[in-house]
Amino acid sequence: MSVHRQFLIFGDYINAWSIQNGLQTLGLKGQCLSIESFARAPNLIDDAILFFTEEASWVFCAQRNLPFRFLPRPYEPVFVDKLLFSEYLCSIGEIPVPFSDFAGTSDFPCVLKPRRSWKGFRKQARGFVCFSQAEMDELLTTLRAQPPQEDDYFVQKFLVNADNISVSGFYDWQTPQRRFFIATRKVLGDGGTLNTGVIVETIPPPSGIGARVARVLSHLRYHGPFEMEFLRDTDTGEYYALEFNPRFWMQHGLFQVGYENVLIRAYLDGEFLCSLPVDADFMLPYKPLLWVDSCYPFVAISKRDGRALRIYSETIRKARRSGYGVNFFPSWAQAFQFALGRFLRRVKRPKSRQ
């Protein structure tokens, strides 16, 4: 592949930095930029491969069918609309987290969740957990009074005792040799009920889960990197499909440290065939790996959250004692620069008038 091509990464956080690192191992250089800056003058860019770390940039490029290399394409609303995805899963006999489009009475506790993670270029809230009809009514009153509107949301059942399990990797519906997955579990989140993972571990693939994912993606004729999240109900052992991310997700660096960078290699080269062994469900061999967010300690320090730091450190020590390979993303130098940038922005922020 020509080193003179442009490799444009939409994003400016861990996900994007991990793509940069993956490109560097191949002797290539990626450029991070915002979708807003790209949207102002896409015609100034000639020969580029685009990488997406969130849905807003993919929607912008895919809906316009821009003449650059990127995956997935073409645009499909079901990839980014969580209600449509849940309805689609039901239509093919798959088992999503129980949901409602507001028809009927909600089964509490439940999550009032945006149908899309982004509205235009504006990031939406992850969702709101409601434990009673009174809490739901209060939220709906707020939504009716200001954007986003009520019909931008739907309801999912909140599974109190559940593990967050992901199957992720690459899928090419036309070429089986370009299908490879790993399974991971969120070990520690960044706080709150609906949280982002700051420590994630690889796990031996649950029986049959890779086949379920392949069936879903085959029906969608999907081609590209992905993460499909599941909730495992610890009371029943059932795996419920939760969400679908048609892009590079936060922990994709595990493919760099454990699996020969095959994810980015497959994305760059349409002829790339995975030489690593996979089982009948396209699962790669299990390796005990830990993905750790190295920006998180700086965030916890800024919040003076000593308890969070202790849990973070002890989780890492415990994993090392259990034989896991611990991998920090991004590098500590990048994490420090991130923390310093946050601090300087806070210092420069104008104080509100009294």
Image (cartoon, rainbow, N blue to C red):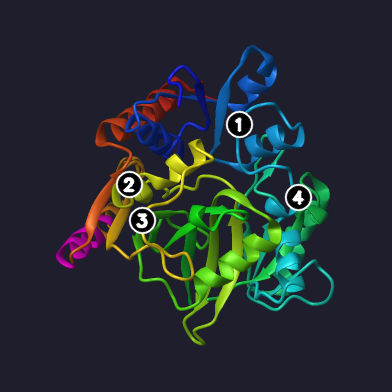
Q: Residues within 10 Å of mark 4 (few under 14, many from 20)?
A: few
- Spatial separation of the CA atoms under disc 1 and disc 3: 25 Å
Residue assigned mark 1: 69
Callout 1 amino acid: Arg
What number is the disc on residue 260? 2
Mark 2 vs mark 3: in front: 3
Residue pictured at 62% horizontal, 49% vertical: 125
- Spatial separation of the CA atoms under disc 2 and disc 3: 9 Å
- The segment highlighted magenta reads 312-322
* Picture quadrant of residue 112: bottom right
Q: Residues within 10 Å of mark 3 (few under 14, many from 20)?
A: few
Task: Pinpoint residue 276: horizontal percent, then vertical percent.
Answer: 36, 56
Compared to residue 221, the image places residue 121 above or below, namely above
What number is the disc on residue 276? 3
Q: Earlier in the sequence, mark 3 or mark 4?
A: 4
Q: Nearer the viewer, residue 86 or 94?
A: 94
Callout 2 amino acid: Glu
* Picture quadrant of residue 15: top left
Mark 4 vs mark 1: in front: 1
Task: Pinpoint residue 334: horizontal percent, then vertical percent.
Answer: 31, 31
Q: Earlier in the sequence, mark 1 or mark 2?
A: 1
Mark 1 vs mark 3: in front: 3
Q: Residues within 10 Å of mark 2 (few under 14, many from 20)?
A: some
- Spatial separation of the CA atoms under disc 4 and disc 2: 32 Å
Task: Pinpoint residue 78: horizontal percent, then vertical percent.
Answer: 73, 55
- Spatial separation of the CA atoms under disc 3 and disc 4: 33 Å
Tell me, yes or no, whether the highlighted magenta stretch contains residue 317.
Answer: yes
Q: Secondary structure at mark 2?
A: loop
Residue assigned mark 4: 77
Compared to residue 312, the image places residue 48 above or below, namely above
Q: Earlier in the sequence, mark 4 or mark 1?
A: 1
